[in-house]
Amino acid sequence: ETGVTQSPTHLIKTRGQQVTLRCSSQSGHNTVSWYQQALGQGPQFIFQYYREEENGRGNFPPRFSGLQFPNYSSELNVNALELDDSALYLCASSLIRSGANVLTFGAGSRLTVL
Amino acid sequence: GQNIDQPTEMTATEGAIVQINCTYQTSGFNGLFWYQQHAGEAPTFLSYNVLDGLEEKGRFSSFLSRSKGYSYLLLKELQMKDSASYLCAVHNDYKLSFGAGTTVTVRA
């Protein structure tokens, strides 16, 4: 069973640019969530996708957007990058069912905005 | 809103026991998770509590009191590889709300 894979692992952008981060979910999972983790902080929920539709969203502006594809892979897009967007972006997949909804995380994409 | 508090850092000796406390005030509650995160790596699932009481899984145990908004993670027989950040997270509907994490350093 493969885990969650993310790409790229590191990238550097400048203010105002756009970035796309990619994620392949764990086999058998139907839901993908994205989290932003600033240095020294816990992950903050950005949004979740289920059946290719946004299923919930955290306190992030509309310039953060996403997609989920039929094979359950996903993208996170961030437009008009700001310095504060520098963080580790974590993708997590899960299988929605009753009981514990355990998230399986990828190792993340570390974004630096200069 | 969500407020989840845990200590920033803890240090313990190899073979010892460490208890990481987590208190929470959240607008909803479907369960509480503990994750371990080594530097530069993905958070990995340790435990899940939805009912009050103690859940034991090998060297790790987790406790929950919903009425007090309180949980702890107990790490026994500490090993050097247990040096990591430990994240407390409240499950509410479709998302997890995380604390800032507790960095545990295990000394020889």
Image: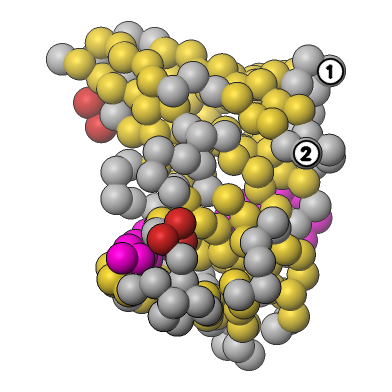
Horizontally, residue A2 falls left or right of residue B41, namely: right
Q: Is residue A41 visible?
A: yes
Q: Report the span colored magenta.
A: A97-114
Residue B98 location (% of width, % of height): 59, 40
In which quadrant of the rendered view does residue B85 lie? top left
Closer to the camera: disc 2 or disc 1? Answer: 2
At mark 2, the secondary structure is loop
At mark 1, the secondary structure is loop
Residue B6 location (% of width, % of height): 54, 23
Q: Residues within 10 Å of mark 2 (few under 14, many from 20)?
A: few
Q: Which residue is mark 2?
A: B1
Task: Name the residue at the front extreme.
Answer: A16
| Residue type of the residue flagged with mark 2 | Gly
Horizontally, residue B24 falls left or right of residue A65, namely: right
Tags 2 and 1 on a common chain: yes
For disc 1, the chain is: B
Horizontally, residue B31 falls left or right of residue A84, namely: right
Rounded to the nearest angstrom, the CA distance separating label 2 from label 1 is 18 Å
Q: Is residue B95 above or below residue B88?
A: below
Q: Which residue is mark 1?
A: B67
| Residue type of the residue flagged with mark 1 | Ser
Residue B58 location (% of width, % of height): 46, 27
Q: Residue at x 52, y 79 (%)?
A: A79
Examine the structure image and report whether residue B81 is included in the region drawn in magenta: no
